[in-house]
Amino acid sequence: MIDRLCRDHSLSCDEYELLLDSQTPRLAEYAASRALEARKSVYGNTVYVRGLIEISNICKNDCLYCGIRRGNQSCSRYRLSEQEILSCCDEGYKLGFRTFVMQGGEDPFFTDELLCTLIKKIKKAFPDCAVTLSIGERSRESYETLFAAGADRYLLRHETADSNLYRKLHPESMSFENRMQCLNNLKEIGYQTGCGFMVGAPYQTNRSLAADLKFVEQFRPDMCGIGPFIPHAATPFAGFAAGALQTTLFLLSLLRLMDPGVLLPATTALGTIDPTGREQGILAGANVVMPNLSPVSVRRKYELYDNKICTGEESAQCKSCLERRMESIGYKIVTDRGDRKPFSL
Ligand code: 5AD
Ligand code: FES
């Protein structure tokens, strides 16, 4: 079945589920070896970097898994000023970053007007850089306005393609339909669009994960961010176990085979559940890392889950740490916007 996925870049939902049910170390190793071939043919041994700037941990939502949910009273809240964000970009540019990802909770303070001014300033100061937004669900008009101001990419994880599971992970005020509508809007508007999901979230089954794979196959995002669920002590999901490293790696390989050109990050969550999680992610087929560019003073506050790594290190330390890590496995971080390379299915 792995060979068929390599060839056709598509399987049925039942087949994805069967693959997940029959996951063994041997099968995962085979999937990873085919995924690496596919990755090599499009991206060689290069790894793209994005500078992640966590602009605000204020969020109007109350997702049950997330450490910065509105209901978490023990979270100390912050938002970065325009000046702080621009200095992060400045530092990032000097370090060789050519993509800035502005990520944050759904913070109403960040109006279209404020964001447009910011995006224009970044694009003016760094015309050779891509600006990625990851600030949640907004109206179609808002997405259009931000795109017109110069935003190039948008990351909005779909979180799960199983609508029943979606309801178990989110409060009633949020809807699966709106999430999907947002993703369709982003793509239609012309953003390079990223979706993604958590692995091993509470109540998740292989059937739900198969739905995620089928969704990604049909949506054909430019990027797909996946990482293990990790419990956060101050959330309703505090008592649940974290997602498995091996399942996450296997899914990365399947995603690479499904779309050899897709941008696939080895996420911070993967590096949190295992000290070499990100290296293993690259060796399973991922081709992007996203070191933290946020000011060190706020890092600990952007705590989506417990024990998040890279909260004490300066940006330059994170960059060189990842450079070393990638070199240790024979890969090389490049100074590049890191756009998706053409690959025709
Ligand atoms: N464990 C792992 N990932 C999480 N995210 C939020 N909370 C957690 C958690 N407890 C992920 C979500 C979100 C992204 C920014 O971080 O998928 O989209
Ligand atoms: Fe941040 Fe290693 S990447 S310390």
Image (cartoon, helix red, strand yellow):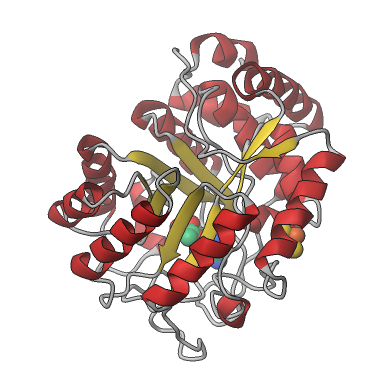
- Please determine whether, in this image, residue 132 is positioned above or below residue 330: below
On the image, the x and y values in percent for residue 239 come to: 62, 74
Q: Quadrant of residue 46?
A: top right
- Residue 272 seen in render: no
Q: Quadrant of the C terminus?
A: top left
Q: Nearer the viewer, residue 265 or 316?
A: 316
Residue at the spot 47% in from the left edge and 30% down from the top edge: 340
Could you tell me how many numbered marks the image carries?
0
Residue at the spot 80% in from the left edge and 51% down from the top edge: 276
- Please determine whether, in this image, residue 191 is positioned above or below residue 272: above
Ligand 2 sits in quadrant: bottom right
- Residue 35 seen in render: yes
Farthest residue, direction front: 125
Q: Nearer the viewer, residue 164 or 137?
A: 137
Q: Nearer the viewer, residue 99 or 35?
A: 99
On the image, the x and y values in percent for residue 20 come to: 61, 33
Farthest residue, direction left: 141
Residue at the spot 39% in from the left edge and 43% down from the top edge: 161
On the image, the x and y values in percent for residue 129 come to: 45, 46
On the image, the x and y values in percent for residue 228 come to: 62, 54
Q: Is residue 139 left or right of residue 345?
A: left
